Image (tube, rainbow, N blue to C red):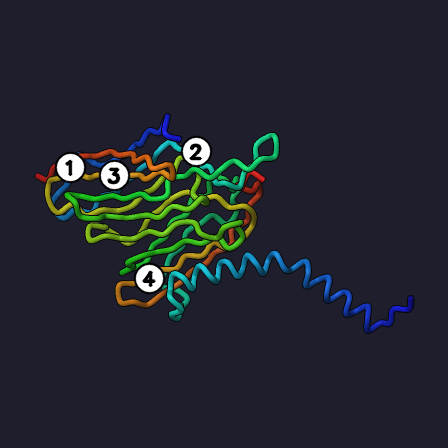
Amino acid sequence: MNVTRRETLAIGTGAAALTLLPLNAAFAATEDAIAAFTGGAEVVEGGVTLTAPEIAENGNTVPIEVAAEGAAEIMVLAAGNPNPDVATFKFGPLAGAREASTRIRLAQTQDVIAIAKLEDGTFHRASQEVKVTIGGCGG
Amino acid sequence: MASGVKPRVKVPATATAGEVITIKTLISHTMESGQRKDSDGNTIPRSIINRFHVTFNDETVIDVVLEPAISTNPYFEFQATVPESGTFNFTWYDDDGSVYEDSKEVSVG
């Protein structure tokens, strides 16, 4: 079988697309989660503070902190987890500050995303990459 | 997992009216994610706390939806405003229907 240079290129592109598929699936799940939260509204970069370590040695407990002035709700997503949802914080009338911290599981090195819904109805996002040495999903 | 669940809450005993205080909570729970497999290769079913709700004199402070990506022994730290003397109620809702509760009194004066 003679494989021309052009065909070789095509095969290579196909193989690359195949290996990228799982990544795209996870990405789509994250986008879906964001769309479900915002209802398709525009999301502005900034206005949310997401504090997470740059490098997490243990993906089982990664400390994170979210804060957003005037937020009604803050949703946290981990784009590289089997299920991107992490938590949603809803602030009540007696919340002293629109901030909270917790510990989360990260399966691999990935972006952690925080999306805040402000009381004026606008959405803001922030994201940070966390490098994970040991994944936290028991796999 | 309804056994061995022990909530721990740290709240200052006194505050001034309108003061913003920091509350730290921890509850011992395996938070089984539903992703892990046992030694025979069978998936261990998900069993987590899915909601955490804090009120002060029946007014909401924070209401959190938890997903399997929350670590074992869920820990939360947040701020609350104390307008008057009263009681903080902390409620955790388990997947299996169990409800774990704790409360702390704060006096203003």
Total number of numbered discs in the rendering: 4
Discs 2, 3: same chain: yes
Where is residue B3 drawn, in percent x and y? 37, 26
Marks 1 and 2, how far apart at CA: 30 Å
Q: Amino acid at mark 4?
A: Lys
Q: Mark 4 vs mark 1: give the one in front.
A: 4
Q: CA distance from mark 4 to mark 3?
A: 24 Å
| Percent of width and height locating residue B36 | 54, 38
Badge 4: residue crowd in 10 Å (few <14, some 14–19, many ≥20): many
The mark nearer the N terminus, 1 or 2, is 2
User: Which residue position is annotated with label 3?
Assistant: B90
Q: Earlier in the sequence, mark 1 or mark 3?
A: 3
**Depth order, front residue of B66/B16:** B66
**Mark 1 closeness class: few <14, some 14–19, many ≥20 residues within 10 Å:** some
Residue position for label 4: A117
Chain ID for label 4?
Answer: A
**Residue B106 tag number:** 1
Amino acid beneath label 1: Val
Residue shown at 30% from the left, 53% from the top: A90
Q: Is residue B95 left or right of residue A53?
A: left
- Calculate the distance from the C-alpha at mark 2 to the C-alpha at mark 3: 19 Å
Which one is nearer the viewer's eye here, A100 or A24?
A24
